Image (cartoon, coloured by chain):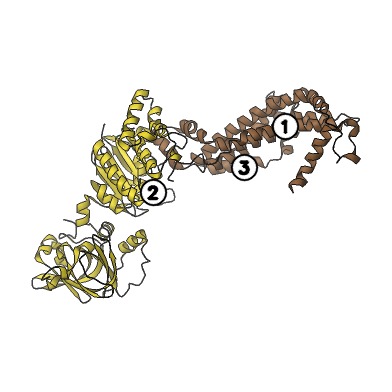
Amino acid sequence: MALFYLLPVYVLVITGLKSFAEVDLATMWKLPSGLHFDNFIAAWDALRPNLRNSVVMSVPAALLSSLLGSLNGYVLSKWRFRGANLIFVLFLFGMFIPYQSILIPLVLFLQRIHLYGSLNGLVLTHVVYGIPITTLIFRNYYATIPTDVLEAARIDGAGILRTYWHIILQVSAPAFAVVLIWQFTSIWNEFLFAIILTRPDQWPVTVALNNLAGSEIVQWNVQMAGALLAALPTLLVYIFLGRFFLRGLMAGALKG
Amino acid sequence: MRVAGIAFEEVSKVFPDGTEAVRELDLQINDGEFMVFVGPSGCGKTTALRMVAGLEEITRGDIRIGDRVVSDVPPKDRDVAMVFQNYALYPHMSVYDNMAFALKLRKEPKSEIDRRVKKAAKILGLDELLGRKPKALSGGQRQRVAMGRAIVREPQAFLMDEPLSNLDAKLRVQMRTEIAKIQSDLGVTTIYVTHDQTEAMTMGDRVAVLRKGLLQQVDTPESLYEHPVNLFVGGFIGSPAMNVVEAGLARSNGGLVAEFGSHRLDIDSEVLGARPGLRAFEGKRVILGIRPEDMEDATLTPDAPQARRLSAVVDLREALGSEVLVYLQLDVPQVITEDIKELAADTNAEEVPEEPAERSVLVARLDPRTRAKKGEPIELLVETKRLHFFDPATGLGIYGDGSSPS
């Protein structure tokens, strides 16, 4: 199974390393004659501004949507108010709204607040669209924090915000790792909002990659190298944040 | 330390689902007193405690701490510290920071925080562990940290919610003494919730027995033991629990005699003097309570009077070294009342059958010199002065003329 899934990756990598002359459907499974790293240089030169756009867009969008999800999850799991369940269900509905169905009102709205065409508009869209899933993950994670601990903090004199800051946030690293990886990956890879909402000079790498192909002939080797470059950051984020998948941050709070 | 009493003034708690957890609780806890709330699970003791802490809203009535009504005061301004059943330590903080947290939030000067934490650590023997995280501590050490967190606050009152129930038996006994000592040294008013009657009896200055949200009786451990207001309290306090049989009271040469099955126990004038209410039950049925420790092997007492003897067959013998528990079959029907059902449900004893059994099982706590053997008959001497009597209709103890405790 794993091999089957890795087949496209294999083709991606070997094609990225071939010279243009070697790229042919007939020889697509064959290894390249030599390592042609110039494909990567060409792709890098073409995609550099777009990679920058992607970073500038994905990092704040992932961080903001995670932070908001964390706050929402905290309130919805630990400071339950009248109608909290209803609000949570409404949040969840947000996950099931297809992107396509809201495109027109979204564009009109962004035009109205003068963010249409800019990266900021795209950031805002991703933050809002991310809130349901981040809220869900954080709420479920915070539900495992014993209420006793929060009550102890309440008696010790911490209010809703100080409890969040001193207790909740301090034990949230595993949840943040999950949510940040998820959000960063999906925002980075997202295409539809990106192409609709941004001007060409603001294009993230996903859109630019599509346009790298040109119109007459497709330089498959450069295209594949570009795709690898575009996928690299999500891999790095996973490796970096994966270290925070620590289990048992709550260990020791309760009886042994 | 500013010490203050706590008063419950007709406090009721009704949960949104309609459960009445606490009903019109009226109770005055004195300055520096160690008050234990005890009762079976679901009796409302924890809810009452959480209302003092401010974690539970009060439906009706008022709670005072000192001379201040705190019913609408948020928890942090009530100046009370709580020790939770699960300890509820902050997992990411060191022992030191766990204890210092409340003081830091109050912006106490660093030197003062340090002084108080070090002092509490010393009292609790945590000096060596201040840098550790809770997960690196044993259960007993975590319990101490939870205590320390309360002590450093120097609050007007300690609230403890079954703090020892998660420790093993040996540690529990040790911590019991330790907590009682710390409390009396600091002189802080304390409410201590437990379902363990031994903890209640050994630790409390006074003990409040609750049942289904209603305060049954509040008194010193000795008085609860000697003058239980009803069958429930009588059965709850004391271990092993009081034996109960249904008996008829008949007149016999000026005094009364309790008859059950083929057994007769004299109730002499001394008992009648202390419980004048018994006269009204002449010719009627009563529930007779005999504590296991008020029976003795009759052969160990020379010329034990016939009128205070019980004969039975030994069912089981448990030697505990300093004493022997003997389970006896008695040819009288088992007594089943609401109180007894409730007590049995709490101790997870075998199911109480709907139909009373033909025979009762009694427990006697005898001197280790007894020669009682399984399956053999035994003669027991009953300390009739210490018998308890309850009205079968109401379950109330029979004391003065109005069937109320004297």
Q: Nearer the viewer, residue A219 or B171?
A: B171
In the rendered image, residue A225, in percent from the top left (x then y), is placed at 80, 31
Mark 3 belongs to which subunit?
A
Is B118 on the left or on the right of A193, as rendered? Answer: left
Q: Are marks 3 and 2 in contact (CB under 8 Å)?
A: no
> Chain B in the picture: what colour?
yellow
Q: Amino acid at mark 2?
A: Asn
Q: What number is the disc on residue A232?
A: 1
Image spot of residue B56 (x, y percent)? 39, 42
Give the camera-side residue of B44 and A247. A247
Give the quadrant of residue B283: bottom left
User: How far, Cα to Cα, is label 1 from label 2?
Assistant: 50 Å
Q: Quadrant of residue B263?
A: bottom left
Q: Residues within 10 Å of mark 2 (few under 14, many from 20)?
A: some
Relative to A234, is B248 above or below?
below
Q: Can the viewer see residue B291 in this picture?
A: no
Residue A54, position in %: x, y? 71, 27
